[in-house]
Amino acid sequence: LNVTDSDLAQYQKNGMALMGEHLTVQVSGCTVTGCGPLGSGMPAQNGIQICDGASGSIVGCLVRDHIYTSGTWAATGLVLDSCGPVAVRDTTLIDNFPGVYCVDTSATVDGLVVENFHPDSGDGFYAYNSTSATRATPARPLPAPFESGWAQRDRAGGGVDMSVTITNSAFWGHDGGWGIGAFGTGTGTVDLTITHSTIEDWDVGIIAYYDPDEGCTGPVSLSAHKNAIVSNHTYGLTNEQPSEVDATNNWWGDASGPKDPFGSEEATLTECFKPAVMKNEDGLGDAVSDLNVNYCPWLGAPATVELVLPAGAPTCYRRGDTLAVELRMVNATTEVIGGQFRLRYDASRLTPQIVDDPEIEEGTVPCAVSGDAPFTRTTARRIDDPEPGRIDYAVGVQTPPGTGTTADTVMARLYFTVKNDATDACSAAGLVAFDDEPGSIPTRLTMPDSTPIYPVEIDLPALAIDSTPPALSPESSVADGSLDAGCGAIVPVNVVLRDACGLLAGDLNFTMAATSGTLDYSSITKTQTDDYTVTIAGGATLTGVTACSATVTITVDAYDCRGNHLPPQEVWGTWSDTTPPTFTAPVGRSENADAGLGTAVLVPAIAAPTPLDCNPATMSYQREGFPPNTGLTDPYPVGTTQIIWTATDACDNESAPQIQTVTVLPYSDLVVHIELQGDIVANVTRCVRFIFRAPSGQTATLDKDIEFRPVAYPDPGVGNRGVA
């Protein structure tokens, strides 16, 4: 059902009653006017009622003058009762009792204006879960919708879970009313969120209530952020239920924050405590109750303007770069249609760019472009001359239609070039800032009714101007050393890179190589030592070197935060073969002298040992009485002869000498021939004398028995016999 551009007045009960589970309504452009204050015996009127499962939207309507003075029932501008989802947008409610009654219904409210200035008008907005008088004492008069048998309606079930969001709205009232209330008088939950709205001039601005002692177990969840809660007489916000209310980041009418004399820990804008102990005794803003209200941090003004970098922009710049700056409005608690600004910039480091903007005002020097919708109308802009370093800037919404906003929005974009002679500074503060010098144009925002707002000003954070690449630290090293016997080594690496304005490990690359062998540097790691230093350290494994030395090189390059490039740098160390060959010396030999001689020829001959080394190696020897590397196979005299063995590799590493001993024993076979002539028929005895001469010619007599035994004589012949 579409109800469009209707003008309703002089009705008895309701301007509209839109009911039924299968009904979806779109109400737009309507004016609904009640009869004003009505007393006992007269109907409690309602402007627009959506209930009993219907859903839909109310857009661009004016609903006014629904007041009931008997105190029993409510005469309501909008009644949303047991509905499907309902959206209310850009609608104004004037002098109703109350403005909105939202019962057991989830709703989204955007751009609602409630003005209850009549002394008999009621509260602004109720988010109410179950209003049955049988379920606890009602906090306010009950709604009186157009429905047969309302008083007998069974609400023993306690309602349903409901969620209500209110944004970009304004609630202005009088000192006898409440601005916005969230009430749980059933078992369902009430979830109410209020943002970017003004709640002003009520007795109580915002209230949260439920009483579990009365059987109302459905809790209330209330959160309020970026609102202007100002000029309310008793409380800006009161919490009359055990759940905590999240009311952080609101404007309470004074930079000192809300009045809260309860608690033990004094809060400030930058130091907060748990609600149970927090107090703000010096707060000059609207008061808060002492039960579970978390109001810290609060906003220091009804809005904030800040100079920020665009999303994703770097925080480091080098000479010649473009610096883009956004002038943003954030945390606006009331609608803003424009603003004017005096800015200053560091003229020693920045030059404003000439930009192309179709909205440029004739005769001005363009250094900025207009912001995002609705702030697309630039009304003035110039660079002060002859005093460089200052910019006047004003921006507003296009008119018509001239619709403002409370949303966080970019109001302007400014562009600068970093000068070619700008000095490096890792933390350059004040590059672009708001100008607060006496006599300067004050920075201010403007509400739709031309009321000025003097916002909190936040300058551009300090940035880095850095045209210098990272540097390799002098203590960087790849160690020198000697290869081990296995032709390898563990090579210690310690390379340090630094940048004055910041260096990240992820922006540093390195490789390693060796001139001989195989190098495994997988265990070398990059470590972020601090924000400005990266260390490459560990031990690389070098194996299989086949040369006299291997040069191990690490090559590094790096980029700093602004992309200044350190080209590849090399650090190296040399690992040399300083280990002599190893070998096993031949074992000593002991031989008898050859028969009848004072010498012996060794059989088998002595063989040279095989050396072990990373590089080719040769063996050499020295036999007593012979030139080097000769005489190994010549006869060895009786006695002891030494052979000295050494090994030398291709890198001139010589092993320690090892000695082999050859011993020739002075013994020989003795053959004695005894001739016996004639026939021997009996044993024969002969005396034989043996003389053994030592090598020096001495003689000695040995008195020993020699036994002869008959043996077969090898020569044929009759009568020949042999003895041994």
Image (cartoon, helix red, strand yellow):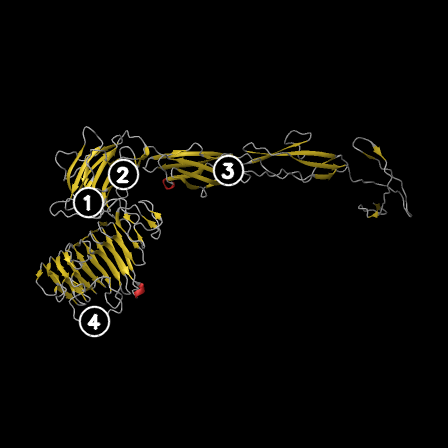
Q: Position of residue 530 (x, y in %)?
A: 40, 39
For the residue pair 67 and 41, the one nearer the viewer reads as 41
How far apart are the alpha carbons under marks 2 and 3? 61 Å
How far apart are the alpha carbons under marks 3 and 4? 103 Å
Marks 3 and 4: which is nearer the front?
A: 4
Of the image marks 3 and 1, the number of the one nearer the N terminus: 1
Marks 1 and 4: which is nearer the front?
A: 4
Q: Amino acid at mark 1?
A: Asp
- Which residue does the image show at 14% across and 64% down from the upper left? 44
Marks 2 and 4: which is nearer the front?
A: 4
Please tell me how crowded label 3 is: few (under 14), some (14-19), or many (20+) other residues with Cα within 10 Å.
some
How far apart are the alpha carbons under marks 2 and 4? 63 Å
How far apart are the alpha carbons under marks 1 and 4? 54 Å
Which label number is shown at residue 459?
none
- Which residue does the image show at 12% across and 58% down from the upper left? 65
| Extreme-top residue of the structure | 386
Q: Is residue 635 visible?
A: no
Q: Amino acid at mark 4?
A: Gln
* Quadrant of the snapshot with the C terminus: top right
What residue is disc 2 on? 460
Of the image marks 3 and 4, the number of the one nearer the N terminus: 4
* Quadrant of the snapshot with the N terminus: bottom left
Please tell me how crowded label 4 is: few (under 14), some (14-19), or many (20+) other residues with Cα within 10 Å.
few
Mark 1 touches mark 4? (CB < 8 Å) = no
What residue is disc 1 on? 372
Q: Amino acid at mark 2?
A: Leu
What residue is disc 4 on? 152
Please tell me how crowded label 1 is: few (under 14), some (14-19), or many (20+) other residues with Cα within 10 Å.
some
For the residue pair 340 and 117, the one nearer the viewer reads as 117
Could you tell me which secondary element the residue under label 2 belongs to? loop
Could you tell me which secondary element the residue under label 3 belongs to? loop
